[in-house]
Amino acid sequence: MAYTTPDEWNTHYTDGGAFRKLGDAERQLLARHAPAPDNGVALDVGCGTGELARHLADSGYTVDALDYAPAALARAEADTGPDTPVTYLLLDIEDDGPQALPHPAYDLIICRLGWAFIHDRTRVMNQLRERLRPGGALCVITPVASTVPDGKRDIALDEAEITLLCAGWKIADRHDADGLAVIVLREPVAVAVRCAGKGRPSPHALTGAGVVVTDPRGRILLGWSARRGVWELAGGKNDADEDFVAAAVRELKEETGLAARAEDARLLALLMDSVHSIPRMTAAVRVTAYHGEPAVREADLISRWEWMEPADLPCLAQPLFTPSAHVIDTVWPGLLPGLPPVHRYSITPAAIPEPAEQAAKAAELRHTMADRLIRDGYLEEGSAIETAFRQVPRHWFLPGIDLDDAYDPMTAPVTRRAPGGQATSSVSAPWLQAVMLRDARLGLGDTVIEIGSGPNAALAQELVGPHGRVTSIDIDPFVTDRTRRFLDDTGYHDVRVHLGDGEQAPATLAQPGSVDALIVTVEARDIPPAWTDCLTEGGRLVVPLRIHGYTWSIPFTKRHGTLVADEYTVCGFVPLQGPGYRPDHTVRLRDGEVTVRFADGTPTDTSRLEAALAMPRTECWTGVTIGADVPFDMLMLWLATHLDEGFARLTVDADLDTGLLQRPRGWDAATLVRDDSLGYVLTRKLPDAPTREPLWEFGIHAYGPHAQQLADTLAGLVTTWDRHARTLSPQLTGYPAARAAAELPPGHVLDKPHTRLVFDWNHDTP
């Protein structure tokens, strides 16, 4: 029987025990298949007394050797010379993970005679392969079950386990070393998750439960069925007189040994599909508390149980049992893309309890957040919004996010990213939620529509009360599924969650003139007619509107069919998806070093800008200064609304920067492009004066034949803003796109596909 705890192994080494000596055949295979490259670094997992680590060091590697038995490391260090490049680490690779390792990547990762003792092998393998350098090798040396006595089966891998070990690698070579299998793995392959059936079920297996249970670190328990070749959740058929929750609790105990109470199991949904033309119903059950450790109890069905990271499941090398995949998708909507079709019947539970310690900490952080928002001026003390912020459990909408981060007033956690890393879904920062709700002016009994689903809907429901109505719309099913589940978990069952295009959905979900407030929590490039039409007279539209490449949260009031606003809060949101998304017109110069973006209006001719940038630079410094922490977003809007054409934004790629252009600080640089010339606004820090705070001066850099003219134009606008408009914000009025120019008031007109925006700064421009 193999040892199973660190204490048992520590006793083993204290009593003089060790592993089998490193043989000549193993040395030769390592020399042939894993020679040390220049400056090569190796990781020895489960190093024992250090014999292998010292051999690798003698072969040219710098070695990190780890074990979880202190007695083993003490013996290893005693037998290792001071000049030998081996670092010994007390670390449990399975429980602690590789985060504490000294090196971020390794040329060789090796586990000799220890892989059979690792329980959650799939998870550990996923972690180790992330630490492997390109071209490196991961080597497992193990006894084979067919060559060891029956009493030592626990120290060896059988052929099915070796096949599982090799899955997910482009190259998996196996060699023999005096009866030991030496498995050399190279080039990990990321594969899309697959689903598989398990053959024709017997009639009594057509209804059953799948159980999602997670350990304290959020890892999900899956079982490997070697006979069927799939990973699956705990669970199984329900007896004729047994409900789904009872079946889930019973099957969990019978299959894994984990004991749970029916009170700690929640029925989330019923999932209906078919197999071999026979209808199949699976109950998705979430177990929130249990005790015990998972163990194989029905070896003919499941050969091993492992805790896995949910984030690893989309790239699992082996298939997931299809009903298990559907149950996982119920708990983590959108995690597994491309699943087979299923009919999902969601169950609306009552608000569920939370562990007392976590609930107490969350409540404390929630009140601390509200206090900070009041102190910083984002919340009015004693207001209904303050009460809502102290009431809504924001962290329930952010599973996997640390409580401190969930309640950080300034943080907007990302909840989903596109494959390229761009954020496609996030939860707004509390300070911005407070500002937008304040600007929406919600009252008891109001009807509210939210575009972009999230916890903002729960806050709005608190403000409108039981007689009000909140509808939350999003185009992404990942977002709407999460929002519906989290609203149910926290008791906000009255909020209506709709999957649809936020541009058009208000027209079908609300009668014209029936909505008191519409709050948009995604960046919008325009104001579609459906948003204005659904509002009551005097209703409020709060929208993060992108204007000439800059985004402000703007509260509009509907007055006689038009929208009027005079407040702006600079902000950032993920962009509106679907037909409402309109990309910038982008011009890349000097092989991508310089990017010029035209966000609104018609782009001007940029074909001669490469030549312009090759000309000497014209500089003009304005004498207009600003404090280091003082926002100047209104200057950007001033410039954009006083330049009839050619306004753009300029950035310099830090990785491609040759020093030709000075990179803008903070914001993208406001830029003017005309004819064959370009000028942009930037700042420089002035020498610190001992009696005042540091100041930054606005200036212009311009290039091209008309550089001086562009520099004078931009400098004149900056100077005029400083003299006459530094404390002003323009009144902004939005009209339907069909409104004739003669019917518009004085001001700068910005035409968008749906709207004509008129900016009035209440004074003449030079």
Image (cartoon, rainbow, N blue to C red):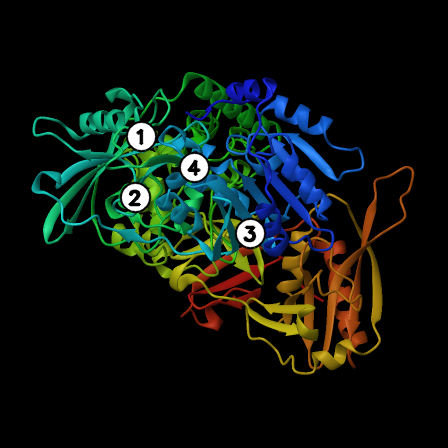
Of the residues shown, which amino acid type is indicated by label 3? Trp
Disc 2 to disc 1, C-alpha distance: 13 Å
**Upstream in the sequence, badge 2 or badge 1?**
2
**Upstream in the sequence, badge 3 or badge 2?**
2
Image spot of residue 258 (x, y percent): 31, 24
Residue that carries the numbered disc 3 in the rendered image: 552
Of the residues shown, which amino acid type is indicated by label 2? Ala
Task: Identify the residue at image location x=18%, y=28%.
Answer: 247
SS type, badge 1: loop
- Evaluate if marks 1 and 4 touch, with contact meaning CB atoms under 8 Å apart: no
Nearer to the camera, 265 or 159: 159
Location of residue 688 by image quarter: top right
Location of residue 755 by image quarter: bottom left
Would residue 586 be visible to someone looking at this image? yes
**Residue 156, label in figure:** 4
**Residue 226, label in figure:** 2
